[in-house]
Amino acid sequence: MKAIRVGVSLLVSGLLTFGAMTAFAQDEAQTLTIEKNAAGFVAPLEAPEGPVTVTIENNADAPTAPLFARLNADVTIEQLAEAFASDPFSALELVALYGGIEVAPNSSASLTLAFAPGTHVLIDFAAEVPAVPSFTVADGEAAGVEPEANVEVNLLDFAFSFPLQLEAGEQTWLIENEGTQWHEFAIAKIDDAMSVADLRTFINGITSGEAEPEGDLFFFAPMTPGERAWLNMDLEPGTYVIGCFLPDFHSGHAHAELGMVQIFNVN
C-alpha cells in the first residue's frame, strides 16, 4: 500500500517507459495473460471489449501491482504525463481506472475487468520507476460473459455495502464503484477482541503511513466511479476490516476517516 501512495510522484518519470509487447490471442472465454519479468511487462498490443479475465504472471523477484487505466477520449499518453508533472490532481480528469491487485514474486493471480474501447495504460506502482505499457481496445461488439458473483461489494461515498457475514473459502466478488470519487480498499485480518479504540488506532496508523498491519494485506487499487471488476477471493475464517484510504477530494481526509471502514466476519 505504501507503494501505491508514492506511485503518483514516480509515475511522471516512468509514464513513457514501455515493456516488451506481444499480439493478443483472443479465445472464446476472452482471457489474456500479462507477464512481469526483470525487463518489464510482456503485455498485449490489443485486448477485446467486454469482460476479460486477466492473469498476471509475476516472474520477477519483487511484487508487482499493475493498475489498469483507460485514457479519456482524445487524451494522449504525452498529455497524461504532462498533467501528472504539472498537477497530479488534474490528471484525475484524464483517465478512468479499472483497479488492480498486487501479485507476489514468482506467482500469478487473476481478475476480470470490463474493458471499454479506447487507449489503455498498465501502471506498475510497485516498481521504483513505474513501467507503463499501453494497449488498445477496439470499438466493436462487446463479447464475453460476466463471471457469476457470490458476493457484491459496492463502493459508496463513504461506506461499503456488502454482507458482513461471509463463508470461508473460494468466492467471486463483484466490485462496483457507485460513488462519485475514486475508491480503493484494503482488507486485513484483525484480532476478534479488538476494541473500537484499538480499531481507530489501527486505521489511523495505516492512513498516516506510520504503521503496517501484521500478516497478509489484500489490496485493490483505485477504481473510477461506474467501473466494475470481479475478484477471486479465498479468505480463511476470522474477523477482518476493510477500508478505503484515498483522500477525499474536498477535505483531504482519508475516506476511512469519513466512515469508509467496516468490520466483517468470515465463518
Image: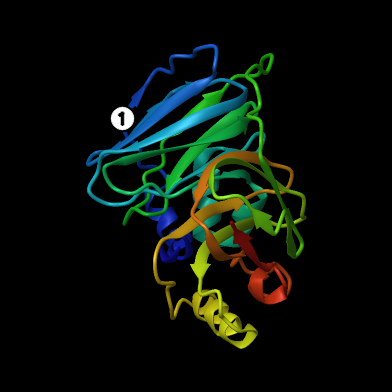
Kind of residue sitting beneath label 1: Ala
Is 66 left or right of 202, judged from the image as shown?
Answer: left
The answer to which of 263 and 23 lies nearer the viewer is 263
The quarter of the displayed image where residue 59 is located? top left
Q: Quadrant of the C terminus?
A: bottom right
What SS does tag 1 mark? loop
Residue 107 in picture, x, y percent from top left: 31, 41
The answer to which of 262 and 159 lies nearer the viewer is 262
The residue at 44%/81% (across/down) is: 210
Q: Outermost residue, top direction?
A: 28
The residue at 61%/30% (across/down) is: 115
The quarter of the displayed image where residue 21 is located? top left
Q: Residues within 10 Å of mark 1 (few under 14, many from 20)?
A: some
Residue 91 in picture, x, y percent from top left: 60, 53
Q: Which residue is mark 1?
A: 20
Is 240 left or right of 42, judged from the image as shown?
Answer: right
Residue 61 in picture, x, y percent from top left: 22, 48
Q: Quadrant of the N terminus?
A: bottom left
Q: Outermost residue, bottom direction?
A: 197
- Tag count: 1
The answer to which of 135 and 48 lies nearer the viewer is 48
Residue 85 in picture, x, y percent from top left: 49, 58
Q: How is the image coloured?
A: rainbow
